[in-house]
Amino acid sequence: MSALTRRVSSLLPTRADVVEMGRAPRRDLLAGLTVAIVALPLALGFGVSSGLGAEAGLATAVVAGAFAAVFGGSNLQVSGPTGAMTVVLVPIVGAYGPTGVLTVGLMAGLMLVALAALRAGRYMQYVPAPVVEGFTLGIACVIGLQQLPGALGVPKPEGDRVLVVTWRAVEEFVRHPNWTAVGLALAVAAVMLAGARWRPTIPFSIVAVIAATVVAQAAGLDEAKPIGDLPAGLPAPSLSFLDLGGLGSLLAPAVAVAALAALESLLSASVADGMTVGQQHDPDRELFGQGLANIAAPLFGGVPATGAIARTAVNVRTGANSRLAALTHAAILAVVVFAAAPLVSRIPLAALAGVLLATAVRMVEVGSLRAMAKATRSDALILVLTAVATLALDLVYAVIIGLAVAGALALRAVAKQARFDQVPLDRGDHAAEEHALLAEHIVAYRIDGPLFFAAAHRFLLELTDVADVSVVILRMSRVSTMDATGALVLKDAVEKLSRRGILVLASGIRPGQRQVLDSVGALELLRHEGPEYGYGSTPEAIRAARDHLRGAGVLPVPTGAERAGVGGRIP
């Protein structure tokens, strides 16, 4: 079997996936039903918000949800249209129209498949845990705040920022209070939260939503606004939207959509793993599944999709065990589209808002947050910054900020590990009277750890501060890594000491560091007419230093009798 064939087969569903779906089908079916109830208004709303209409949102939830469930790398991930993706799509619709969005979705899907083939998903493991925890906390806050207009029974205000929209919704509620909607939302959330503690296996979200719908209909509560009319059926698959002449101008938007889809999907899968025990997603398969989902969805008029954290959280919290739950969610939404639209249209929006409010509360793992905050100050800072950025900015910026801060703090910690210590010379081969003379003119320093841009300048200050010596020997066998900045700083330090008449020699330079030193011209300065790649050991460098000092008249040249007196051991 060729490498390409093995790579493709590793991205396809396996027999183990089918076996897993048969272990707890009842739990998966109930979880899928619950997720479908939650996903329906979200799919409709995100479709409308994107500018392509409710039909596009439903098509995305059904088609992308099914493809990602079958081919994705997570047993628990639920995919569909998301709020973060909608924010990206709105300007694309304005600039290129609906056909531009569909073309961008198809192009992004192809890019995601290419990323999966290149095994780009594995780099997700380098995202620090505080970033994931902060992202999850921020998403929980965003989800909760997004439900306030529905929970307060007011129309969703204009705006892209969740904090602005929330404030405007509260102002509208103060002017026109709707206590019926508030009561329904709080009742549904309370039933879900209390029920989860009492009987975790019972889908209390379904019970609460059905009860709220029955009460609203029986009492004739006009303030409990229903979802409204739903479209019937999905459009036939078509490629008529493709504009091959405009692909060049759509490349940049497609890259942005693909990046967001990869980032949000992999983070969502990581969050799902963290909410369970024993689940571990395959990041490359997840990218592959999301790629196929985004290729298929535009064919049915759907918008680009990603893994949806809110729906995935509902899926996990309601007991999902395998990808059968996500498949059930897509199948139920398909049934709704074709057969049950009149019934679902009566569900109060406030009841669905209550479901997501409870979901947001249950997404917050207090124990994990407390442990992360107590670990180190750096972890606590990263967690808080990521959460705040998720709430105040958007998902992509939040992760970028979290990664940037985590990277800077990690570099700072690594840089602190670099040590520059004076060490005693190996005196086993020298007479006592010569040790005192060597100590006056030769000093050895050992460099431990990395010598790179974050630690190099501190090294420069310490090295050039050396005084009252004639030769400096750098023992470099313990340098773990070196970059061009470190090599340049080392060269600068050597040149400054040379101008003061101090010779610098090095020993133990590793093969991997020679090229870096040689590329900036530092290797020639360090070997001082020695071997091509510097001195292999400290004793060799000591002998070269003593020869240099004798040649300069600093050390006397030993006589034959003196050599014989120490057994010829002095080089």
Image (cartoon, rainbow, N blue to C red):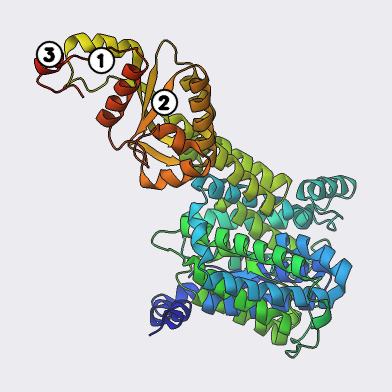
- The residue wearing badge 3 is 561
Closest to the observer: 93 or 520? 520
Q: Is residue 79 above or below residue 266?
A: below
Location of the C terminus by quadrant is top left
Q: Name which of mark 1 and mark 2 comes first in the sequence.
A: 2
**Residue sitting at x 46%, y 33%:** 525
Whether the residues at callouts 3 and 1 have beta carbons within 8 Å, the answer is no
Quadrant of the rendered structure where residue 334 is? bottom right
- Residue 136 horizontal/vertical position (percent): 58, 51
Query: Which of the pair 442/220 is nearer the observer?
Result: 442
In x, y percent, where is residue 219? Answer: 77, 66
Coordinates of residue 473 in the picture (x, y in percent): 36, 25
Of marks 2 and 3, which one's residue comes earlier in the chain?
2
Mark 2 lies on a secondary structure that is strand
Q: Amino acid at mark 1?
A: Val
| Amino acid type, callout 3 | Ala
In the rendered view, would you say 478 is above or below 77?
above
Residue 20 figure quarter:
bottom left
Q: CA distance from mark 1 to mark 2?
A: 21 Å
